[in-house]
Amino acid sequence: MIQKYVVFDFETTGLSAQKNEIIQIGAVKYDEENNEISRFNQLIKPQRSYVSADISRLTGIYSRDLLNQPVINDVLPDFLNFIQGHLLVAHNAPFDVGFLYQAIIDCQIRDAERFEVYDTLTEARRLMKAKSYKLENLKDFLGISVRSHDALNDCLVTGLLYQHLQKIEHPQKALVTSDEAEDEQLSLFTSFQDEGITETLRRKLGLPLTKDLVYYKQATDKSWQVLDVIGISISQEYSAGFSLCLTLFDNEKVNIHSDFFVQMQKKNFVTDISEVL
């Protein structure tokens, strides 16, 4: 059943929900068609623990960044309102849910709803084959380039991962002609190539039919370069989507998953990504 959902992630002062605290809440809300509706992003001042040097190196959050931020008692009610009535999606969900319930207890909130939770880590291990299921490694497969261990950035990656897993779990069944029936018997992981950027290829990948295709690349100064795509080849077909090799205007080759390349063609793509960098 397709349902609206909220992808969420916490950055914390440590691994223990009882001893440590949430220092950043990130969340992105989606509708039933995977359209982004709104975002929640808030730093939080800890009250019973401190931000260690290791945590600062991992998250980029320092104690000085939190001095003037609200405490969890002031933030949690707004977050609970934000997620109300939605499926919760998280990577390694038991960790984040543990901190969420501990915060509810600490804040003495007695009317919180029961949460339905989807763990993308568990489902990725069940549905995908990968050398590592860490989010920072899976983002390379998804073709998204954002800094890891930022709560909102991690939500964007987890959201794409959730959508990818849903396509594997619930594939769209298309009608095929008798001429195509034999092709359906091929392995889901059969490699093949398509040359050029034809209308047929655009339709196959779900790309705009007339718009010039672009690839966004982040420069060393954190600005975004917009590069024309002059060629696309399919290097691998999966049960959900394709692994693509793009040829850019300067003949540079880049690899990207088709789902994320489609996202790049949206008008607000660079604005949405830039907001969290």
Image (cartoon, rainbow, N blue to C red):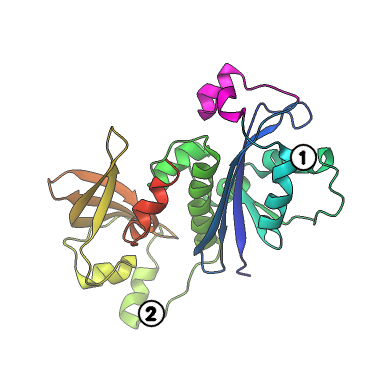
Q: Amino acid at mark 2?
A: Val
Looking at the rendered image, the disc whose residue lies closer to the viewer, 1 or 2, is 1
Query: Which one is in front, 97 or 201?
Result: 97
Q: Magenta segment, which residues?
A: 48-67
113 falls in the magenta region: no
Query: Which one is in front, 123 or 176?
Result: 123
| 105 lies left or right of 260 | right
Q: Position of residue 224 (x, y in %)?
A: 28, 44
Q: Quadrant of the N terminus?
A: bottom right
| 265 lies left or right of 48 | left
Q: Amino acid at mark 1?
A: Ala
- Gap between marks 1 and 2 measured at Cα: 52 Å
Disc sitting over residue 201 in the figure: none
Q: Position of residue 218 (x, y in %)?
A: 30, 40
Residue topped by disc 1: 103
| On screen, residue 76 above or below 55 | below
Residue 189 visible to the viewer: no
Which secondary structure, mark 1? helix
Q: Are marks 1 and 2 in contact (CB under 8 Å)?
A: no
| 261 lies left or right of 61 | left
